């Protein structure tokens, strides 16, 4: 797997694609392709961490792809390293000229740079892609500015992917990303209520920085990092309105037709289709009956699915 490193640890010199590339959709890949083709410098993706808006405005920015996940996505498309630039107030105060000189030229020894046409950088976002061309050009660094990719629905963007996931539209998110959306979590102990009604579940602890789909019940594929074998599953994402309406949101996964000890393992989840919204049932028997209906529908859907 390609290394995830700081600017000081990077292999030099670099040919770098600069941006957050969250979701790594087709538009992002067009930018990255500019530095993975023949030319000077080690093909490198450079992003800020944490997101600048978290530092500047205190916003929470959940990621479609965490850095550790992104390395496995970047390697097959020719990237040799992912460099995260620590973003803080000091960095945010750099003028565009100083950012290019200190970070891109001196620290990363950029020979080539690629950005999207909407790229902004420097103090108060005063630098744009064409300012980058001018500043870097004076340092003999070639800068490629890639036009924004659009389809019949408009601009291809991370925001559209998030909106699709929030609405449970996994097919749209998959189309925009060119791959299935996935997340993972560590299996932790629950209260055993699912097992008590005949539907044992794995309770997942997911990284709080990961963007998750909208609340509801989903058909999904699931597999452990050890086995890699996909299992059919039903996932509940959200609170437990029948068992404990006051409990916080949770991720609960039931593997269909399997009895496997998943304790202390990491489970990878690939939601395929949203079945329904969450609902409060009158009793646990009614809940169990509905899960049975969900499970039968999930078997039918996954029988036709060929993503795993």
Image (cartoon, helix red, strand yellow):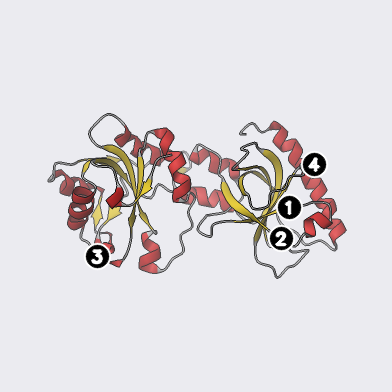
* Distance from the alpha carbon under mark 2 to that under mark 3: 46 Å
Task: Name the residue that disc number 4 marks.
Answer: 296
Q: Is residue 25 visible?
A: no
Q: Residues within 10 Å of mark 3 (few under 14, many from 20)?
A: some
Q: Quadrant of the C terminus?
A: top right
User: Which label lies toward us, 4 or 2?
Assistant: 2
Query: In screen coordinates, is 189 left or right of 129?
Result: right
**Of residues 225 and 77, the one drawn nearer to the viewer in this rendering:** 225
Task: Name the residue that disc number 2 marks.
Answer: 190
Badge 4 element = helix
Q: Residue at x 18, y 50 (%)?
A: 106
Task: Name the residue that disc number 3 marks.
Answer: 93
Residue 244 percent location from the top left of the image: 75, 67
Badge 2 element = loop
* Distance from the alpha carbon under mark 4 to that under mark 3: 57 Å
The answer to whether the residue labelled 2 contacts the one labelled 1, judged by CB atoms less than 8 Å apart, is yes
Residue furthest to the left in view is 138
Query: In screen coordinates, is 248 left or right of 281?
Result: left
Residue 164 percent location from the top left of the image: 55, 48
Q: Residue at x 23, y 41 (%)?
A: 13
Q: Residue at x 35, y 49 (%)?
A: 5
Query: In screen coordinates, is 117 left or right of 28?
Result: left
Task: Name the residue that disc number 1 marks.
Answer: 201
User: 160 above or below 229?
Assistant: below
């Amino acid at each position: 797997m390609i290394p995830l490193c700081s600017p000081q640890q990077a292999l030099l010199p670099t040919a770098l694609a600069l941006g957050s590339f969250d979701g790594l959709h087709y538009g992002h890949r067009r930018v990255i392709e500019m530095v993975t083709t023949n030319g000077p410098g080690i093909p490198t993706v450079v992003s800020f961490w944490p997101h600048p808006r978290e530092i500047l405005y205190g916003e929470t920015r959940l990621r479609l792809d965490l850095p550790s996940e992104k390395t496995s996505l970047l390697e097959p498309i020719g990237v040799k390293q992912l460099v995260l630039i620590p973003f803080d107030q000091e960095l945010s105060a750099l003028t565009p000229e100083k950012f290019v000189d200190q970070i891109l030229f001196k620290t990363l020894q950029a020979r080539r740079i690629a950005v999207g046409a909407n790229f902004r950088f420097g103090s108060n976002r005063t630098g744009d892609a064409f300012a980058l061309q001018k500043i870097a050009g004076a340092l003999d660094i070639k800068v490629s500015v890639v036009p924004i990719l659009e389809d019949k629905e408009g601009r291809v963007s991370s925001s559209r992917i998030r909106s699709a996931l929030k609405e449970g539209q996994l097919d749209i998110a998959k189309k925009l990303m060119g791959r299935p959306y996935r997340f993972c979590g560590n299996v932790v102990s629950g209260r055993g209520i699912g097992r008590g009604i005949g539907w044992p579940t794995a309770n997942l602890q997911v990284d709080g920085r990961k963007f998750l789909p909208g609340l509801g019940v989903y058909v999904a594929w699931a597999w452990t990092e050890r086995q890699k074998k996909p299992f059919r599953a039903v996932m509940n994402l959200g609170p437990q309105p029948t068992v404990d309406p006051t409990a916080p949101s949770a991720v609960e996964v039931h593997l269909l037709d399997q009895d496997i000890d998943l304790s202390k393992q990491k489970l990878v989840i690939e939601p395929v289709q949203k079945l329904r919204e969450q609902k409060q049932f009158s009793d646990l028997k009614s809940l169990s009956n509905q899960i049975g209906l969900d499970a039968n529908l999930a078997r039918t859907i996954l029988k036709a699915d060929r993503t795993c």
